[in-house]
Image (cartoon, grey):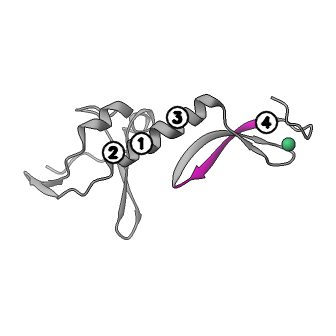
C-alpha cells in the first residue's frame, strides 16, 4: 500500500498502552496506519485485558505453587493441558507465554518440579 508521501506502508509492531499492536508504517515519513481489522483486534484485546486483569492468590499444589487463570482466557486460545513458557521480566514480574510460540520452544521448557 502506498502512502500519500510516496513511501510504502510496511508491517510494523507498535506498542500502545502496553499492548503490542500489528500496524502499518510508512518507510519514508513514518506515518502509522491501522487497517479496520487491526483496529478491531486492538479493541477486542483492550476489552480482554480489562476482563482478565485480576488479583489472584498463589496456591500450593503438591510441591509447586500455582495460580488459577480466568476461564475467559479461552477466548484468546488458552486451553487446559497447554504448555506455557515463563520468564522473569523484572524483580517482581513474570511473563507467561502460551500459543504457537510456547509450543515451538517446548524442548527448552524445564519439566515441572517433581
Ligand atoms: Zn509516508
Which residue, given by chain and number where applicable, does mark 1 sit on? Answer: 47
Label 3 element class = helix
User: Would residue 47 be counted in the magenta stretch?
Assistant: no
The x, y position of residue 114, in whole percent, is: 13, 49
| Mark with earlier residue (4, 1) | 4
The x, y position of residue 23, in whole percent, is: 66, 39
Q: Which mark is residue 9?
A: 4
Q: How many marks?
A: 4
The span from disc 4 to disc 2 (Cα, nearest Å) is 33 Å
- Above-or-below relation of 111 to 11: below
The span from disc 2 to disc 1 (Cα, nearest Å) is 6 Å
Which residue, given by chain and number where applicable, does mark 3 sit on? Answer: 41
Is disc 2 surrounded by few (<14), some (14 to 19) or many (20+) residues within 10 Å?
Answer: few
Q: Quadrant of ligand 1?
A: top right
| Mark with earlier residue (4, 2) | 4
Which tag is nearer the camera, tag 4 or tag 3?
A: 3
Please state if 23 lies on the left or on the right of 68 as rendered.
Answer: right
| Mark with earlier residue (4, 3) | 4
Which residue, given by chain and number where applicable, does mark 2 sit on? Answer: 51
The span picked out in magenta is: 10-17
The span from disc 4 to disc 1 (Cα, nearest Å) is 28 Å
The span from disc 1 to disc 3 (Cα, nearest Å) is 10 Å
Amino acid at each position: 500500500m502506498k502512502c500519500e508521501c510516496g513511501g510504502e506502508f510496511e508491517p510494523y509492531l507498535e506498542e500502545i498502552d502496553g499492548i503490542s499492536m500489528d500496524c502499518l508504517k510508512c518507510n519514508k515519513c513514518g506515518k502509522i496506519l491501522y487497517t479496520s481489522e487491526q483496529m478491531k483486534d486492538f479493541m477486542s484485546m483492550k476489552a480482554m485485558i480489562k476482563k482478565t486483569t485480576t488479583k489472584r492468590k498463589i496456591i500450593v499444589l503438591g510441591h509447586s505453587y500455582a495460580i488459577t487463570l480466568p476461564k475467559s482466557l479461552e477466548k484468546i486460545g488458552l486451553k487446559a493441558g497447554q504448555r506455557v513458557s515463563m520468564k522473569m521480566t523484572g524483580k517482581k514480574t513474570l511473563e507467561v507465554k502460551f500459543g504457537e510460540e510456547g509450543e515451538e520452544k517446548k524442548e527448552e521448557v524445564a519439566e515441572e518440579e517433581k
